[in-house]
Amino acid sequence: MAEGGGGARRKAPALLEAARARYESLHISDDVFGESGPDSGGNPFYSTSAASRSSSAASSDDEHERPGFSGTLASPPPPARAPYAQDPEEDEASAGWSATLRDRPPPRFEDTGGPTRKMPSSASAMDFFQLFVPDNVLKNMVVQTNMYAKKFQERFGSDGAWAEVSLTEMKAFLGYMISTSISHCESVLSIWSGGFYSNRSLALVMSQARFEKILKYFHVVAFRSSQTTHGLYKVQPFLDSLENSFDAAFRPSQTQVLHEPLIDEDPVFIATCTERELRKRKKRKFSLWVRQCSSTGFIIQIYVHLKEGGGPDALDALKNKPQLHSMVARSLCRNAAGKNYIIFTGPSITSLTLFEEFEKQGIYCCGLLSSRKSDCTGLPPSMLTNPAIPPARGQYQIKMKGNMSLICWYNKGHFRFLTNAYSPMQQGVIIKRKSGEIPCPLAVEAFAAHLSYICRYDDKYSKYFISHKPNKTWQQVFWFSISIAINNAYILYKMSDAYHVTRYSRAQFGERLVRELLGLEDASPAH
């Protein structure tokens, strides 16, 4: 027993080295925020962390929508075990599905991802932020805020304490709001209080009364135009500008993910607030989806879907509609055609119809399937039914239709994947610390690797959302999008020469940006 344990311990470093090589071959950067943080033990996609806990979420099945990917990826895959067999259906053959597999080359991708502009080593946090929110955008906010204040007072009476806001004040106003993403204090007014979250150096820049006046009248678009019918008209021009600047500043890698980032609540607030405060929270009236580079975490596109219907669960009902998610996917990929991107999707988006449509546009996909959440139209029924006797772990069955592969893989539960991005002939492997190597198709390994990175990114990313929670939907969307812009700015900073000079963590970068927006002079840390 002792020798066996020693052998396992000697084998572990070699496995981790092989996993690291495989991990890097997928072009996934590690530790995007320059700081270590606790992993999510219950997150099923933590397959690329050497210290991941293989016992957590180990027992999982298709009904839970959670592939049991925990452990690390390895480079030299073992031969695949014999797949378990099911009786073929005649109608499946007539529909084009066959158990005869053929190899296919991966989509060619010759573009070099990364920043499109080389920033100088002296670039500040403000320089990176203004790649996405430049002065002309801030000046428009100044104009729109002053216009709204004027019309408001014409209708409801003069406000003697109001004076038109300036560009300098607008920058300071944004700085105060962004500071809540660092302090994790939901009330920005705490800066002027004498409590734990007070900050005298920030409070001296602007009085609390002046800040509250700007907050009262703040607008990105003051008035609806006669042609506008969109419910987000007060923020849509800003979202469009933000997406254009994201596209101009960064070229994504070939592999990307469509998903909903963690935006529900700040975890510190949830942990400390009372039950009464939670009950007072208004249900979010929109869902926010993104297309995100799985190599860096850079968010390329944003899509906001407003809740329809007046019921309290209307948004949740919409989340179960495959047609809604197909619409979301089409919108997020509208600028991706012809570039041979590989898009990873969750069960609600994965469908044969959508993937075939994308393939005609030069977009390839790999998605997790669920008989409960996915649109399974056109898929062979025999592949969607679990056998009476569960197969051994690592066994799988594949059927093909054209370039499309439907994979049913078993790992303490049946997991199904649909892909036209990876050859069904190529083998992959997932290494679990306790169970050793588990064979799988390469598509499964790739899905686990890229989704795990996005989950780890989200765990850190959600800590730096602006904590201010307005009641108006357009303002919620605006502050979420500002948070995304700051995170993208930090990613560009980490990929620039400036990072090698100052080496700010994400928290330090946010603090520096706040001070620069408020016009405070602060010496750079010694290095």
Image: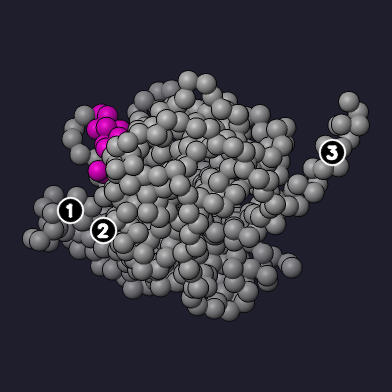
Q: Residue at x 8, y 60 (%)?
A: 226
Position above or below: 395 against 445: above
According to the picture, the residue beneath numbered tag 2 turns out to be 236
Secondary structure category for the residue under label 3: helix
In this view, the residue in front, 62 or 201, is 62
Q: Amino acid at mark 3?
A: Arg
Disc 3 target residue: 9
Q: Are marks 2 and 3 in contact (CB under 8 Å)?
A: no
Q: Which amino acid is tagged 2?
A: Gln
Which sits earlier in the primary sequence, circle 3 or circle 1? Answer: 3
Q: Between marks 2 and 3, how big is the CA–CA gap?
A: 55 Å
Q: Earlier in the sequence, mark 2 or mark 3?
A: 3
Give percent across and percent down for residue 55.
Answer: 66, 29
Q: Is residue 260 left or right of residue 226?
A: right
**Image height of 371 relative to 172, above or below:** above
In the picture of the structure, the residue carrying the numbered disc 1 is 230
Quadrant in the picture for residue 122: bottom right
Badge 1 marks a residue whose secondary structure is loop
Magenta-tinted stretch: 312-325
Question: What secondary structure is the magenta-colored segment mainly?
Answer: helix
Regarding residue 29, the answer to whether it shows in the image is yes
Q: Amino acid at mark 1?
A: His
> Is 493 displayed left or right of 366 in the figure?
right
Q: Residue at x 40, y 55 (%)?
A: 403
Q: Secondary structure at mark 2?
A: helix
Viewer-nearest residue: 403 or 140: 403
Q: Residue at x 67, y 64 (%)?
A: 503
